[in-house]
Image (cartoon, rainbow, N blue to C red):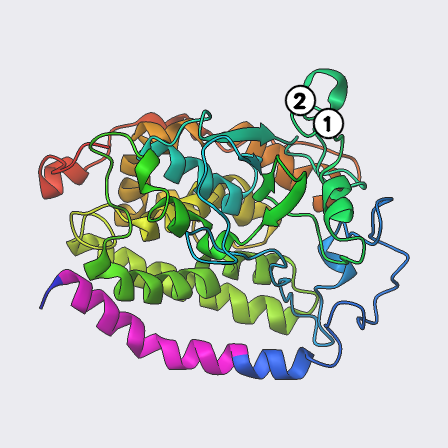
Amino acid sequence: MAIEESACCSISAHRRRVQNTASAEQNKNNQVNQIGNNPVDQNTNTSAFGHVATSEKAHETSASGAFVRQKNRFDTPFGAKPGQLPVEAGRYRLIWTPLCPWATRQKIALGLLGIGEDVISVGKVNPVRTPEGWEFSLDPGGKDPVLGIRYLPEIYAETDPSYEGRATVPTIVDVKTHKVVNNDYHRLTNYWETVWKPFWKEGAPDLYPKELRTGIDALNEILFNEINNGVYKAGFAETQAEYEKNYHLVFDRLDWLEAHLAENRFLFGDRLTDSDIRLYVTLARFDSAYYFEFRLNKKRIRDYDNLWNYAKELQSIPAFREATDFDAIKRGYFLGDAGTNPYQILPLGPDNSVWEEPNNRTEKFGPLKYRY
Protein backbone atom coordinates (compact mmCIF):
# COMPACT_ATOMS: atom_id res chain seq x y z
CA MET A 1 0.00 0.00 0.00
CA ALA A 2 1.34 3.47 -0.91
CA ILE A 3 2.41 5.63 2.00
CA GLU A 4 -0.32 8.23 1.39
CA GLU A 5 -2.95 5.46 1.34
CA SER A 6 -1.56 4.02 4.56
CA ALA A 7 -1.66 7.39 6.26
CA CYS A 8 -5.22 8.05 5.10
CA CYS A 9 -6.36 4.65 6.34
CA SER A 10 -4.79 5.22 9.75
CA ILE A 11 -6.37 8.65 10.01
CA SER A 12 -9.78 7.39 8.95
CA ALA A 13 -9.79 4.92 11.82
CA HIS A 14 -9.63 7.84 14.27
CA ARG A 15 -11.63 10.44 12.38
CA ARG A 16 -15.13 9.35 13.45
CA ARG A 17 -14.19 9.61 17.12
CA VAL A 18 -12.70 13.07 16.65
CA GLN A 19 -15.69 14.36 14.69
CA ASN A 20 -18.17 12.97 17.20
CA THR A 21 -16.27 14.55 20.09
CA ALA A 22 -16.06 17.91 18.34
CA SER A 23 -19.72 17.81 17.36
CA ALA A 24 -20.85 17.01 20.89
CA GLU A 25 -18.71 19.76 22.36
CA GLN A 26 -19.94 22.28 19.83
CA ASN A 27 -23.58 21.41 20.48
CA LYS A 28 -23.00 21.82 24.20
CA ASN A 29 -21.35 25.20 23.71
CA ASN A 30 -23.53 26.77 21.01
CA GLN A 31 -25.75 28.60 23.49
CA VAL A 32 -22.94 30.02 25.56
CA ASN A 33 -20.01 30.55 23.24
CA GLN A 34 -21.21 32.68 20.35
CA ILE A 35 -19.34 35.97 20.21
CA GLY A 36 -21.64 38.60 21.60
CA ASN A 37 -23.61 36.05 23.65
CA ASN A 38 -20.87 34.72 25.89
CA PRO A 39 -21.62 35.02 29.60
CA VAL A 40 -18.10 36.36 30.20
CA ASP A 41 -18.19 40.04 31.19
CA GLN A 42 -17.87 41.93 27.91
CA ASN A 43 -16.06 44.78 29.68
CA THR A 44 -13.03 42.63 30.49
CA ASN A 45 -10.34 41.13 28.25
CA THR A 46 -11.05 43.62 25.47
CA SER A 47 -8.77 46.25 24.01
CA ALA A 48 -9.13 50.01 23.86
CA PHE A 49 -9.77 49.62 20.13
CA GLY A 50 -13.44 49.05 19.36
CA HIS A 51 -14.71 45.71 20.65
CA VAL A 52 -11.58 43.67 19.83
CA ALA A 53 -10.80 41.01 22.44
CA THR A 54 -7.26 40.64 23.75
CA SER A 55 -7.58 37.38 25.66
CA GLU A 56 -8.95 33.92 25.01
CA LYS A 57 -10.98 34.32 28.21
CA ALA A 58 -13.25 36.90 26.57
CA HIS A 59 -15.18 34.47 24.38
CA GLU A 60 -13.46 31.10 24.22
CA THR A 61 -14.31 29.17 27.40
CA SER A 62 -17.43 26.99 27.43
CA ALA A 63 -19.80 26.24 30.30
CA SER A 64 -18.01 22.91 30.81
CA GLY A 65 -14.63 24.62 31.20
CA ALA A 66 -13.44 23.63 27.72
CA PHE A 67 -11.35 25.89 25.53
CA VAL A 68 -13.21 26.45 22.25
CA ARG A 69 -11.00 28.38 19.86
CA GLN A 70 -12.62 31.25 17.98
CA LYS A 71 -13.36 30.88 14.30
CA ASN A 72 -11.39 32.99 11.85
CA ARG A 73 -13.37 36.03 10.77
CA PHE A 74 -11.28 37.03 7.72
CA ASP A 75 -11.10 34.00 5.43
CA THR A 76 -11.44 35.29 1.86
CA PRO A 77 -9.19 33.04 -0.26
CA PHE A 78 -6.46 34.19 -2.61
CA GLY A 79 -7.10 33.50 -6.27
CA ALA A 80 -8.20 34.81 -9.64
CA LYS A 81 -11.96 34.28 -9.26
CA PRO A 82 -14.42 37.10 -8.57
CA GLY A 83 -14.48 37.98 -4.89
CA GLN A 84 -11.10 36.41 -4.17
CA LEU A 85 -8.01 38.30 -3.07
CA PRO A 86 -5.82 39.06 -6.09
CA VAL A 87 -2.37 37.46 -6.12
CA GLU A 88 -0.21 40.56 -6.43
CA ALA A 89 3.38 41.14 -5.35
CA GLY A 90 3.93 44.00 -2.93
CA ARG A 91 0.28 44.37 -1.97
CA TYR A 92 0.10 42.41 1.29
CA ARG A 93 1.84 42.43 4.65
CA LEU A 94 2.12 39.38 6.91
CA ILE A 95 2.12 40.09 10.64
CA TRP A 96 3.65 37.34 12.75
CA THR A 97 5.54 36.53 15.94
CA PRO A 98 7.93 33.58 16.47
CA LEU A 99 5.95 32.75 19.60
CA CYS A 100 2.88 31.70 17.62
CA PRO A 101 2.78 28.28 15.94
CA TRP A 102 0.10 29.35 13.43
CA ALA A 103 2.17 32.37 12.37
CA THR A 104 5.45 30.44 12.28
CA ARG A 105 3.89 28.04 9.77
CA GLN A 106 3.64 30.95 7.33
CA LYS A 107 7.30 31.93 7.71
CA ILE A 108 8.43 28.35 7.17
CA ALA A 109 6.29 27.88 4.06
CA LEU A 110 7.37 31.21 2.58
CA GLY A 111 11.00 30.34 3.29
CA LEU A 112 10.79 26.89 1.70
CA LEU A 113 9.07 28.31 -1.39
CA GLY A 114 11.39 31.29 -1.69
CA ILE A 115 8.61 33.88 -1.55
CA GLY A 116 10.54 36.92 -0.37
CA GLU A 117 9.62 40.21 1.27
CA ASP A 118 9.54 41.91 -2.13
CA VAL A 119 6.41 39.80 -2.70
CA ILE A 120 4.92 39.56 0.82
CA SER A 121 6.30 42.10 3.27
CA VAL A 122 6.63 40.98 6.87
CA GLY A 123 6.02 42.73 10.18
CA LYS A 124 6.77 41.22 13.58
CA VAL A 125 5.09 41.85 16.92
CA ASN A 126 6.65 41.32 20.33
CA PRO A 127 6.20 37.69 21.48
CA VAL A 128 4.93 38.88 24.88
CA ARG A 129 1.31 39.87 24.38
CA THR A 130 0.19 42.96 26.28
CA PRO A 131 -3.23 43.75 27.81
CA GLU A 132 -3.82 45.86 24.68
CA GLY A 133 -2.96 42.95 22.38
CA TRP A 134 0.02 42.24 20.14
CA GLU A 135 2.42 45.20 20.13
CA PHE A 136 4.93 46.41 17.54
CA SER A 137 7.43 47.33 20.26
CA LEU A 138 10.35 45.78 18.38
CA ASP A 139 10.16 48.47 15.68
CA PRO A 140 11.77 51.92 16.00
CA GLY A 141 9.27 54.24 17.60
CA GLY A 142 7.11 51.31 18.67
CA LYS A 143 5.04 51.31 15.47
CA ASP A 144 4.90 49.08 12.41
CA PRO A 145 6.82 51.03 9.73
CA VAL A 146 4.33 50.17 6.98
CA LEU A 147 0.99 50.17 8.79
CA GLY A 148 1.80 52.94 11.26
CA ILE A 149 0.08 51.19 14.18
CA ARG A 150 1.33 50.34 17.67
CA TYR A 151 -1.10 47.52 18.47
CA LEU A 152 -2.53 44.92 16.12
CA PRO A 153 -6.13 45.40 17.40
CA GLU A 154 -6.04 48.91 15.91
CA ILE A 155 -6.26 47.65 12.36
CA TYR A 156 -8.87 45.01 13.22
CA ALA A 157 -11.10 47.72 14.69
CA GLU A 158 -10.44 49.93 11.67
CA THR A 159 -11.33 47.07 9.30
CA ASP A 160 -14.52 46.10 11.14
CA PRO A 161 -15.65 48.31 14.05
CA SER A 162 -18.10 45.60 15.16
CA TYR A 163 -15.47 42.84 15.37
CA GLU A 164 -15.43 41.21 18.83
CA GLY A 165 -12.91 38.42 18.36
CA ARG A 166 -9.19 38.51 19.10
CA ALA A 167 -6.70 40.22 16.79
CA THR A 168 -4.63 37.17 15.91
CA VAL A 169 -1.41 36.30 14.17
CA PRO A 170 -0.90 35.50 11.40
CA THR A 171 -2.70 38.49 9.95
CA ILE A 172 -2.60 39.48 6.30
CA VAL A 173 -3.18 43.18 5.68
CA ASP A 174 -3.86 44.72 2.28
CA VAL A 175 -1.51 47.72 2.37
CA LYS A 176 -3.48 49.43 -0.41
CA THR A 177 -6.73 49.47 1.55
CA HIS A 178 -5.14 49.36 5.04
CA LYS A 179 -7.52 46.57 6.03
CA VAL A 180 -7.21 43.05 7.39
CA VAL A 181 -8.08 40.64 4.58
CA ASN A 182 -7.11 37.22 5.92
CA ASN A 183 -6.33 35.62 9.29
CA ASP A 184 -7.29 32.08 8.27
CA TYR A 185 -4.29 30.10 9.49
CA HIS A 186 -6.10 26.87 8.54
CA ARG A 187 -5.71 27.56 4.81
CA LEU A 188 -3.09 30.28 4.51
CA THR A 189 -0.10 28.02 3.90
CA ASN A 190 -2.12 26.25 1.20
CA TYR A 191 -2.45 29.53 -0.70
CA TRP A 192 1.33 30.07 -0.64
CA GLU A 193 1.68 26.48 -1.84
CA THR A 194 -0.71 26.84 -4.79
CA VAL A 195 -1.92 30.16 -6.22
CA TRP A 196 1.26 32.02 -5.25
CA LYS A 197 3.35 29.62 -7.38
CA PRO A 198 4.32 32.38 -9.88
CA PHE A 199 6.51 33.82 -7.11
CA TRP A 200 8.23 30.60 -6.02
CA LYS A 201 11.98 30.29 -6.34
CA GLU A 202 13.36 27.98 -8.99
CA GLY A 203 13.29 24.39 -7.75
CA ALA A 204 10.90 25.12 -4.87
CA PRO A 205 9.35 21.99 -3.32
CA ASP A 206 5.72 21.15 -3.99
CA LEU A 207 4.45 21.10 -0.41
CA TYR A 208 0.82 20.44 -1.34
CA PRO A 209 0.94 18.09 -4.36
CA LYS A 210 -2.39 17.34 -6.00
CA GLU A 211 -2.01 13.58 -5.68
CA LEU A 212 -1.57 13.86 -1.89
CA ARG A 213 -4.06 16.61 -1.05
CA THR A 214 -6.84 14.33 0.15
CA GLY A 215 -4.45 12.64 2.57
CA ILE A 216 -2.78 15.90 3.60
CA ASP A 217 -6.13 17.55 4.34
CA ALA A 218 -7.27 14.55 6.38
CA LEU A 219 -4.06 14.43 8.38
CA ASN A 220 -4.05 18.20 8.90
CA GLU A 221 -7.53 17.97 10.41
CA ILE A 222 -6.30 15.37 12.89
CA LEU A 223 -3.15 17.33 13.67
CA PHE A 224 -5.19 20.44 14.39
CA ASN A 225 -7.70 18.72 16.67
CA GLU A 226 -5.33 16.45 18.55
CA ILE A 227 -1.90 18.14 18.42
CA ASN A 228 -1.78 21.80 17.34
CA ASN A 229 -4.96 22.85 19.14
CA GLY A 230 -4.98 19.80 21.40
CA VAL A 231 -2.18 21.27 23.51
CA TYR A 232 -4.20 24.47 23.97
CA LYS A 233 -7.34 22.55 24.88
CA ALA A 234 -5.35 20.91 27.67
CA GLY A 235 -3.51 24.07 28.69
CA PHE A 236 -6.53 26.39 28.72
CA ALA A 237 -8.94 23.88 30.27
CA GLU A 238 -10.72 25.18 33.36
CA THR A 239 -11.82 21.82 34.78
CA GLN A 240 -9.88 18.69 35.66
CA ALA A 241 -12.06 16.60 33.34
CA GLU A 242 -11.38 18.78 30.29
CA TYR A 243 -7.67 18.86 31.05
CA GLU A 244 -7.40 15.09 31.44
CA LYS A 245 -9.43 14.40 28.30
CA ASN A 246 -7.14 16.52 26.17
CA TYR A 247 -3.98 15.38 27.95
CA HIS A 248 -4.74 11.85 26.80
CA LEU A 249 -5.82 13.05 23.36
CA VAL A 250 -2.43 14.68 22.78
CA PHE A 251 -0.28 11.82 24.02
CA ASP A 252 -2.32 9.13 22.26
CA ARG A 253 -1.71 10.94 18.97
CA LEU A 254 1.97 11.49 19.75
CA ASP A 255 2.28 7.73 20.27
CA TRP A 256 0.64 7.14 16.88
CA LEU A 257 3.01 9.60 15.22
CA GLU A 258 6.01 8.01 16.92
CA ALA A 259 5.08 4.65 15.38
CA HIS A 260 4.34 6.18 11.97
CA LEU A 261 7.68 8.00 11.84
CA ALA A 262 9.53 4.79 12.65
CA GLU A 263 8.79 3.71 9.07
CA ASN A 264 8.51 7.07 7.29
CA ARG A 265 11.05 9.86 7.09
CA PHE A 266 8.32 12.48 6.84
CA LEU A 267 4.58 12.20 7.34
CA PHE A 268 4.11 11.27 3.68
CA GLY A 269 7.16 9.11 3.08
CA ASP A 270 10.23 10.80 1.66
CA ARG A 271 8.41 14.01 0.64
CA LEU A 272 8.24 17.03 2.89
CA THR A 273 4.68 18.41 2.83
CA ASP A 274 2.43 21.01 4.42
CA SER A 275 1.59 18.48 7.14
CA ASP A 276 5.20 18.37 8.32
CA ILE A 277 5.22 22.13 8.78
CA ARG A 278 2.08 21.90 10.89
CA LEU A 279 3.42 19.14 13.12
CA TYR A 280 6.84 20.73 13.53
CA VAL A 281 5.63 24.00 15.04
CA THR A 282 4.00 22.15 17.94
CA LEU A 283 6.98 19.85 18.47
CA ALA A 284 9.33 22.85 18.57
CA ARG A 285 7.31 24.43 21.41
CA PHE A 286 6.55 21.32 23.39
CA ASP A 287 9.54 20.90 25.70
CA SER A 288 10.05 24.64 26.27
CA ALA A 289 6.43 25.60 26.89
CA TYR A 290 3.67 23.00 26.70
CA TYR A 291 5.36 20.44 28.96
CA PHE A 292 5.46 22.99 31.81
CA GLU A 293 2.92 25.74 31.13
CA PHE A 294 0.17 23.44 29.78
CA ARG A 295 0.90 20.58 32.21
CA LEU A 296 1.53 18.14 29.35
CA ASN A 297 4.19 16.42 31.39
CA LYS A 298 3.89 12.73 30.55
CA LYS A 299 6.86 12.87 28.18
CA ARG A 300 8.98 15.46 26.43
CA ILE A 301 9.46 15.33 22.66
CA ARG A 302 13.12 14.53 23.26
CA ASP A 303 11.96 11.39 25.10
CA TYR A 304 10.58 9.95 21.83
CA ASP A 305 13.16 8.40 19.51
CA ASN A 306 11.48 8.95 16.14
CA LEU A 307 9.59 12.18 16.83
CA TRP A 308 12.71 13.76 18.31
CA ASN A 309 15.03 12.84 15.46
CA TYR A 310 12.35 13.83 12.92
CA ALA A 311 11.98 17.23 14.62
CA LYS A 312 15.75 17.76 14.72
CA GLU A 313 16.05 16.98 11.01
CA LEU A 314 13.34 19.50 10.19
CA GLN A 315 14.99 22.10 12.42
CA SER A 316 18.24 21.61 10.48
CA ILE A 317 16.52 22.81 7.27
CA PRO A 318 17.16 26.58 6.94
CA ALA A 319 13.52 27.66 6.54
CA PHE A 320 12.55 25.82 9.75
CA ARG A 321 15.60 26.90 11.73
CA GLU A 322 15.33 30.57 10.76
CA ALA A 323 11.67 30.70 11.82
CA THR A 324 12.32 29.05 15.21
CA ASP A 325 13.22 31.29 18.15
CA PHE A 326 13.26 29.31 21.39
CA ASP A 327 13.79 32.40 23.55
CA ALA A 328 10.75 34.12 22.01
CA ILE A 329 8.72 30.96 22.54
CA LYS A 330 9.59 30.82 26.25
CA ARG A 331 9.03 34.53 26.79
CA GLY A 332 5.70 34.49 25.01
CA TYR A 333 4.23 31.56 26.90
CA PHE A 334 5.53 32.42 30.37
CA LEU A 335 5.41 36.23 30.46
CA GLY A 336 2.74 38.82 29.79
CA ASP A 337 -1.00 38.31 29.87
CA ALA A 338 -0.83 34.87 28.21
CA GLY A 339 0.86 33.24 31.20
CA THR A 340 -0.17 32.31 34.74
CA ASN A 341 3.00 33.78 36.15
CA PRO A 342 2.27 36.70 38.51
CA TYR A 343 5.94 37.35 39.35
CA GLN A 344 7.03 37.21 35.69
CA ILE A 345 9.74 34.62 36.31
CA LEU A 346 11.26 33.21 33.14
CA PRO A 347 12.47 29.58 33.38
CA LEU A 348 16.15 29.05 32.61
CA GLY A 349 15.63 25.64 31.02
CA PRO A 350 15.31 23.50 29.11
CA ASP A 351 18.65 23.22 27.31
CA ASN A 352 17.74 23.81 23.66
CA SER A 353 21.29 23.35 22.41
CA VAL A 354 20.34 19.68 22.02
CA TRP A 355 18.40 20.68 18.88
CA GLU A 356 21.79 21.18 17.20
CA GLU A 357 22.90 17.63 17.90
CA PRO A 358 22.95 15.19 14.95
CA ASN A 359 19.79 13.28 14.08
CA ASN A 360 19.60 9.68 12.84
CA ARG A 361 17.24 10.15 9.88
CA THR A 362 19.97 9.91 7.21
CA GLU A 363 21.32 6.76 8.86
CA LYS A 364 17.83 5.32 8.92
CA PHE A 365 16.44 6.46 5.56
CA GLY A 366 19.46 7.55 3.50
CA PRO A 367 20.25 11.00 2.07
CA LEU A 368 17.43 13.44 1.45
CA LYS A 369 15.99 13.01 -2.06
CA TYR A 370 15.06 16.68 -2.32
CA ARG A 371 16.90 19.87 -1.41
CA TYR A 372 15.12 22.24 0.91
Q: Is residue 319 above or below residue 24?
A: above
Residue 291, how many percent across, how many down? 52, 48
Q: Report, in whole angstroms, how far the alpha carbon at label 2 lies from the one at label 1.
A: 6 Å
Left or right of 55? Residue 229 is left
Please identify the dominant SS of the magenta region: helix
Dot 2 crowding, Cα within 10 Å, few <14, some 14–19, many 20+: few
Residue under label 2, please give it.
145
Residue under label 1, please give it.
148
Q: Nearer the viewer, residue 178 or 125?
A: 178
Q: Amino acid at mark 1?
A: Gly
Q: What residue sits 60% from the left and 30% below the top?
A: 124
Residue 17, how many percent across, how many down? 42, 80
Can residue 187 be seen in the rendering of this structure?
yes
Q: In the orientation shown, which residue stands out farthest toward the right? A: 43
The local secondary structure at tag 1 comes to loop
Q: Nearer the viewer, residue 98 or 121?
A: 121
Instruction: Answer whether labels 2 and 1 touch (C-beta < 8 Å).
Output: yes
Left or right of 241? Residue 110 is left
Residue stretch in magenta: 3-22
Q: Is residue 5 magenta?
A: yes
Q: Is residue 24 above or below residue 93?
A: below
Q: What residue sits 52% from the left and 42% below the top?
A: 103
Can residue 348 be seen in the rendering of this structure?
no
Q: What residue sits 34% from the left and 34% below the top?
A: 199
Quadrant (top left/top right/bottom left/bottom right) for the N terminus: bottom left
Q: Which image quadrant is residue 75 in? A: bottom right
Quadrant (top left/top right/bottom left/bottom right) for the C terminus: top left
Q: What residue sits 11% from the left and 43% below the top?
A: 365
Left or right of 291? Residue 178 is right
Q: Which image quadrant is residue 342 in? A: top right
Residue 319, how many percent across, how many down? 36, 31
